[in-house]
Image (cartoon, rainbow, N blue to C red):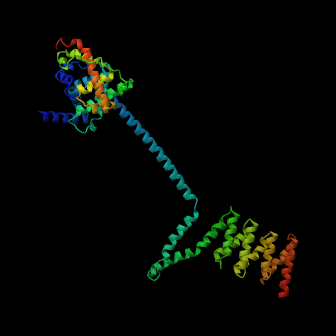
Amino acid sequence: MHLSISINEQELVKQCIAREEKGYTMLYNKYAKRIYHTVYRVMGNSAETEDIVQEAFCTAFEQIAKLKNQNNFEGWLKRIALNQAISTLRKKKMVFTEDGQLETVADEELDMNEELLFQCKVDDVKAAIQQLPDGYRTIMSLHLFEDMGQEEIGNMLGISHTTVRTQYHRAKKKVFLALKDKAYYGT
Amino acid sequence: MEHDFFKRYVQEHKEAFEDQALPPNMLGNILGNMRERQLIQERRKRKLTYTWMAVAASMLIFAGSYLFLSQETTVTTPPRQIASNNKNKVEAPVALPTEIVSAKTAVNTEKPKRLVAYQPNKEIYSGLADSLSVASRLNAILKAGSLPTLDQKLKTVLSKVFNEDENDNVRLAALEVLSKFAADKYIQQQLTAGLTKQKDPVIQLELIKVLGNSNNPETTDKLIAMADNPLTMDVVKDQVHYALLTKQQLQ
């Protein structure tokens, strides 16, 4: 099954290289939703997300001949989209800073057990993540949803992996703090 | 970030996190943007091509005009080069060994030899024929003067110059060359004829000096005529008298 999907993807990439509209449409239908959500979680608003996703698809389709591993179109496209999202955030004067310069979360002990998180509604968690500052939200999204490691996130944002680690934990605390009163309503 | 419950929670509910619908017509926008960009790129390429074509055309025109001008200058400037080329062309058959060439071709080989012998005279003739430049006529006469002998053609041409050239200096120079070969019968005749033709006193004086020793009776008659001519200058008359007296003493 996986083999047939890979072959299909290769064929779609070849169609795109040949500038066939069918190839563009198929690849878009396959990956647009995932890429859209990836960017949306970083940007936090739909208007900018739409622009970035469109631009990322355009860039990827135009430069698809440069794609070395034709079975990894999604990874390549996601990297293009995330880079554009991060550079858009940077243009908005958002700086991914080292420790101490970001707003610090009160280091008070949270009495919430992490396992209680499973009793929260997804919408509440989503809302709590959305309310995070841009920097925290970006790091949290990349780690939780894109499954990226500290090193990789650090390289992408131009900060050290320890900063990524610290900021992730602070972001998590902030989310838990926001969910503190909602933990017992269940999912 | 190990044993992260939060991460586990997200993985388990990932689909619920991604429930937002895609904005409508995003694919249409993407394809439209791509078409637009492609058009812009093609226009840029065309612009670039036109620019390069314009540059290439102007370079071609420049190179062409440069070549044309340089060709023009090479044709007009060195006449010597053309002469030397002719020389080479003529000399080539001379190099052939005459023994090998058959009797029929022997006639042909003689012609270039004659041409080679005439080479310096050609320059003299062209110099003498240059009616616009006194200097080139004088130069040609000097060259003729350096020759050990004068052929008939050159004698005729030099005599004509001596009798008819409009410039006194040229006529004087021609006289100087001809006087070297005054023993020649033809030249003597021409010089004698010059006694009546030449009107410049300086030339007349030189001519009398050259012909003074001549035993030719025609020369003596002409000298007497000159002495009797009321238009002859006194200085010339004195020279004529001196020449006639010397002749009589010798006789």
Q: Is residue A57 above or below residue B216?
A: above
Q: Say which residue appears at 21% left-offset and 20% top-offset.
A: B17
Q: Residue furthest front?
A: A109
Q: Say which residue appears at 53% left-offset and 77% top-offset.
A: B113
Q: Exactly how many numbered labels are in the figure?
A: 0
The quadrant of the rendering that contains the N terminus of chain A is top left
Residue nearest the observer in this picture, B238 or B169: B169
Q: Position of residue B101 (x, y in %)?
A: 44, 80
Q: Residue furthest bottom?
A: B251
Q: Position of residue A36 (x, y in %)?
A: 26, 23
Q: Position of residue B50 (x, y in %)?
A: 42, 38
Decide if residue A90 is on the left or right side of residue B163: left
Decide if residue A12 is on the left or right side of residue B95: left
Residue nearest the observer in this picture, B104 or B59: B59
Say if residue A58 shows up in the picture.
no
Q: Say which residue appears at 83% left-offset and 80% top-offset.
A: B243
Q: Position of residue A159 (x, y in %)?
A: 34, 31
Q: Toward which corner of the image does residue B144 lie, by quadrant?
A: bottom right
Q: Is residue A66 above or below residue B181?
A: above
Q: Is residue A183 above or below residue A164?
A: above
Q: Is residue B249 above or below residue B147?
A: below
Decide if residue A185 is on the left or right side of residue B62: left
Say if residue B116 shows up in the picture.
yes
Q: Toward which corner of the image does residue A131 lie, by quadrant?
A: top left
The quadrant of the rendering that contains the C terminus of chain A is top left
Decide if residue B236 is on the left or right side of residue B31: right
